[in-house]
Image: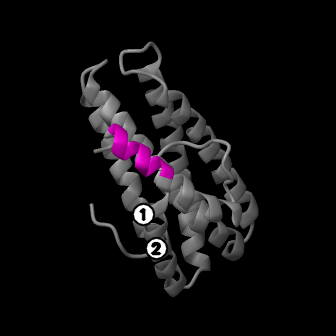
Amino acid sequence: MSHGGDIIRELTTDHREVDELFDQFAAAPSGSERRRELADTLTIELVRHSVAEEEHLYPAVREHVEGGDALADKEIADHARVEELLKALEGKAPDDEGFDRLVATLRTEDTAHVRDEEDNLFVRLQDATHPYILESLGEKVREAKKTAPTRPHPGAPSTPPANKLLAPGLGLVDRARDLVTRRGA
């Protein structure tokens, strides 16, 4: 899938890529190392995506969309649940009891979150925001994903300014750990 364009296109592309990773996970043999690799890739993509949304999408929703505070708060709460699931998944081997169940729960949570964003939040943001702003936000999201963490940090702040200050440092540490462990290679 091609990344680029406004924030809605960028994030929708991420959503489709995560859907594909879930499909690959479902097709991989139960208990296999391939499932661990796919769970790691899912974690990396979901964390980077969530951090970018928390840094740029939700502040824009708060600013431009009527009732945006409540919408953003709900989406951030969704992220917190997903992050807890990712943290639990991080410590499990693919042949551990509960590994597949955690991924299934993660997929259910993610699917509901994506549906809500695409059917509600994105539509409302697009209606309330000038295309130039949406394009600018798309570029900011792409940049944020480059330095975002790749591992779940449930205790980290999820709103500006603290998240914008801490995320690049956490991301640097995570990418160093990933390099050493060859996670996500």
The residue depicted at 63 percent of the width and 52 percent of the height is 75
Residue type (three-letter) at the residue carrying disc 1: Lys
The residue depicted at 55 percent of the width and 34 percent of the height is 87
Q: CA distance from mark 1 to mark 2?
A: 13 Å
Position of 87 with respect to 80 (left or right) is left
The image quarter in which residue 32 lies: top left
With respect to residue 38, does 174 lie above or below? Answer: below
Across and down, in percent, residue 136 comes to 49, 81
With respect to residue 7, does 131 lie above or below? Answer: below
The residue depicted at 55 percent of the width and 58 percent of the height is 169
Across and down, in percent, residue 100 comes to 41, 22
Across and down, in percent, residue 92 comes to 45, 22
Residue type (three-letter) at the residue carrying disc 2: Gly
Residue on which disc 2 sits: 138
Instruction: Characterize the local packing of mark 2: few (<14), some (14-19) or many (20 or more) Cα atoms within 10 angstroms.
Output: many
| Magenta region | 173-181
Residue on which disc 1 sits: 146
Label 2: which secondary element: helix
Residue 102 visible in image: yes
With respect to residue 86, does 165 lie above or below? Answer: below
Position of 128 with respect to 38 (left or right) is right
Label 1: which secondary element: helix
Q: Nearer the viewer, residue 41 or 183?
A: 183
Residue 120 visible in image: no
